[in-house]
Image: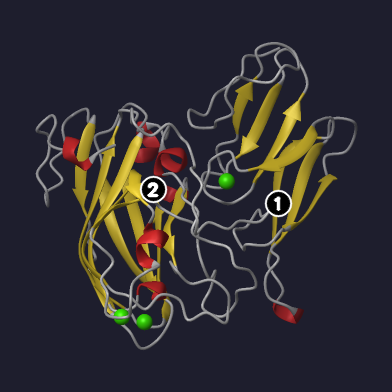
Amino acid sequence: MRLGALGLVGLCVVGVAAIPLTATAADFAGGGIGPIPDGNPTGINVTFNVSGFVQPIQGVSLKLNIAHTYVSDLRATLISPAGKAQLLVFGRPGARNSSSPGASSNLGGEYVFDDNGGDLWAAIAPLTSSGVVPPGRYRTSTSGKESASAQLSDHGGCSTSLTSAFGGLPGSEANGIWTLNIADEVSIDTGTVNAALLSVDTVADPIFAYGFEPRAQCKTAWLDLTGAGRSSYVLVRNTGGGPTGTITWYVKDNIATGSSAGALTMFEHGIASDFFLTGDWDGDGIGDAAVWRSGTPGQFIVRPSSHPSHHCCQCADRADHLPHVLSCHHREVCPGP
Ligand SMILES: [Ca+2]
Ligand SMILES: [Ca+2]
Ligand SMILES: [Ca+2]
């Protein structure tokens, strides 16, 4: 989606969430803006009261007026109502492993995050400590250092997609309080969110074709189901019992060491007769659990990391032939056998 299209139907005024009965595109000003607590991973929550959508949303973009003197201190995550879907907007951009202090350049001005923007990490790379990241449009991107204290790999800087994370949310799930959590995870340098605007529409973007072009700054890890930048430890167990018993996935985050070793996540996905695999179907840089279920039609059933409560299907055109397009964007529902 494009911010330039926001006034398209005259439905809203910047700063005022004026809502039509049935929204097709609208802006929502953020509440809770202000100084970002220094060296505090909890951060602040900027909230957007979204309403008026009946049809599934497609495009989401975020405009921030933000000032900060050390861009690599910051992490920002956008979360839809009730946590149904979420995406890291940026996380410690420019910062990689634990020996790197990250990028000391500044934020100052208006930054738009949408699926047609430029590469934030590339924009940061040449800047000095007093340099300002050029205001403008940027893609969302995967995290550098995954926390203030731990980083074991050089991952981060891969472009992700707001449309893939949030597109397809039905109106009932798009309406409500959206949250942008912004945290400054490293002490000394500080900053402030001066304004925030969330733009939502129901029109698929004609320009972005869900591609993830190579980025010189981008590094990722195979079988990384947590976004830690290293392969996760993953097991599946037949916890339902029998030849079609429910399968529980056990995912151990591969960060930290000793008693603080990574957290264990458990969730049910698939049945014992499925084939199990992983990949990144929603393009958020984090691996998704998936199964292939043979049948007529055969189907991939994916648990996208950006919206894990929506197990979405991609059907084959006939029994055990691969689908034409692998995407969870529209949360396809396969017809019954
Ligand atoms: Ca600086
Ligand atoms: Ca700081
Ligand atoms: Ca994913």
Foreground label between 2 and 1: 1
Q: Is residue 29 above or below residue 194?
A: above
Q: Earlier in the sequence, mark 2 or mark 1?
A: 2
Q: Nearer the viewer, residue 76 or 151?
A: 151
Q: Position of residue 142 (x, y in %)?
A: 50, 57
Q: Is residue 155 left or right of residue 68?
A: right
Is the residue marked by circle 1 packed among few (<14), some (14-19), or many (20+) residues within 10 Å? many
Instruction: Name which residue type carries label 2.
Output: Pro
Element type where label 1 sits in the image: loop
Q: Mark 2 and ligand 3: say if the CB distance to the nearest ligand atom is below 8 Å.
A: no
Residue type at mark 1 is: Leu
Instruction: Give the x, y percent position of residue 154.
Output: 59, 67
Point 70% across, 14% down: residue: 297
Q: Residue at x 43, y 77 (%)?
A: 185
Q: Which residue is mark 2?
A: 81
How dense is the environment of label 2, judged by Cα within 10 Å: few (below 14), some, or many (20 and up)? some
Point out the image quarter for the N terminus: top left
Q: CA distance from mark 2 to mark 1?
A: 28 Å
| Residue 205 found in image quarter | top left
Q: Quadrant of the C terminus?
A: top right
Q: Is residue 306 above or below residue 145?
A: above
**Could you say which is closer to the camera, residue 2 or residue 127?**
127
Total tally of numbered discs in the picture: 2
Q: Nearer the viewer, residue 274 or 256?
A: 256
Q: Residue at x 49, y 52 (%)?
A: 215
Taking the image as shown, residue 230 lies to the left or right of residue 116, namely right
Q: Is residue 175 visible?
A: no
Q: Is residue 83 above or below residue 133?
A: above
Mark on residue 223? 1
| Outermost bottom residue | 188
- Residue 52 versus residue 186 in the image, above or below: above
